[in-house]
Image (cartoon, helix red, strand yellow):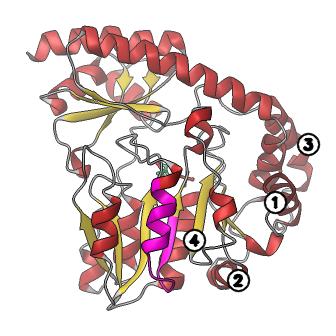
Amino acid sequence: APEYIRAIRPYQPGKPISELAREMGMPESGIVKLASNENPLGMSPAARQAIVDALAEVARYPDGNGFALKAVLSARYGVKPEQIVLGNGSNDILELVASSFLRLGDAAVFSQHAFAVYPLATNAAGARCVEVPAVAYGHDLDAMAAAIDGDTRVVFVANPNNPTGTFLPGEALEAFLRKVPADVLVVLDEAYTEYLAPEQCYDAIAWLTHFPNLLISRTFSKAYGLAGLRVGYAFAHPDVADLMNRVRQPFNVSSLALVAAEAALGDQEFIARSADLNRRGMAQISVALDELGLEWIPSAGNFLTFRAGKAAAVDAALLRQGVIVRPIAGYGMPEWLRVTIGLPEENLRFIDALRAALAETR
Ligand code: PMP
């Protein structure tokens, strides 16, 4: 294998519930997993019903062009179907960006502490990673613009960012877009956009008209609760979408994922309920972290990152109590842990376990 493939650091997913249950000899029902930014409500009942109804059809290939889902996305967001790319999760979108627009000798710019798939996809394409130091754990857009050179083909911007939860206001993003050369693709990763507070919302889709080098990446994995089905999407200029659609696997999104996503989009009441639950859970956990005297980073997503100190030991103590959170040493934050906001009783389990873990590891 080429050296740039050997250099790839594997993505480390959250520990599965079944694995911890086996290791600890606990029933799965006793385990609380707050490690992968999933929606604790699961999926909309409408999506679940759509899957059940579609089971009769799964022996056939899915619609490789995702006609029905694109029609619903098109109507809802006012983009043309030819501006849409569907992905097997938004990870697939990020990889399609890299395989369509990056090759040996090119560079991709992204922030320190940004989502792990940016370096992974960049390295897999043989391109060079330019990691720009963060400010206050978030993206330094001025420094990112300054890091763009003649080799740069792609810039990744996560808003909100994972794992830090930091948020960039619309005006800052628009100013950044004006600075980026027209031949550099700006990937605006909005995986958590449904969780934004009303006053944080901005209209990135309107920018597509002025910035043909903008790509907006979104997912059904987070607020829509379809992480296990794997479906994401991108909005871009038709020429950008066309190239990615040539590179992607012909049937990259399964039939069940397509129908579930379509039904999920139609249940916006579920999204509002999920965002509301998240807001309350965020308050519940942040108050508890304050009481425990722990530093945390204000988050616009459905997770909270806090300074645990001896994070590996705290994580191990949490696991022994059946609580799975996410260590983020791989993101250059060895003292920090990331917890996904769960149901009120799950948050409480986490808070109690954390209190015990801190007492144990002090
Ligand atoms: N972008 C960000 C910022 C994420 O946090 C994630 C999920 N961890 C993804 C993209 C990819 O998620 P998915 O492939 O499930 O859409």
Give the Cα distance between marks 4 and 1.
Answer: 16 Å
Q: In terms of sequence position, does the residue under pointer 2 or pointer 4 come before the other?
A: 4
Question: Is residue 152 placed above or below 269 in the rendered structure?
Answer: below
Q: Which amino acid does label 3 sit on?
A: Asp
Q: Label 4 amino acid?
A: Leu
At x 84%, y 34%, the residue is 46
Q: Residue 214 carries which label?
A: 4
Residue 179 on the magenta span: yes
Q: Which of the two discs, 1 and 3, sits closer to the camera?
A: 1
- The x and y percentages for residue 145 are 34, 71
Viewer-closest of 160 and 127: 160
Q: Tell me, for residue 265, which label it has, or none.
A: none
Q: Mark 2 points at which residue?
A: 242
Could you tell me if the residues under marks 2 and 3 are in contact, i.e. CB atoms within 8 Å? no
Q: How far apart are marks 2 and 4 (CA)?
A: 14 Å
Query: Does residue 77 belong to the magenta stretch?
Result: no
CA–CA distance in space, label 1 to label 3: 28 Å
Q: Which residue is drawn at 49% across and 69% down?
A: 177
Number of marks in the image?
Answer: 4
Magenta span of residues: 172-187
Q: Mark 3 — residue? A: 53
**Mark toward the viewer: 2 or 4:** 4
Q: Tag 1: residue type?
A: Gly
Instruction: Kindly identify which residue carries mark 1.
Output: 78
Residue 269 quadrant:
top right
Alpha-carbon distance for marks 4 and 3?
37 Å
User: Which SS class for mark 2?
Assistant: helix
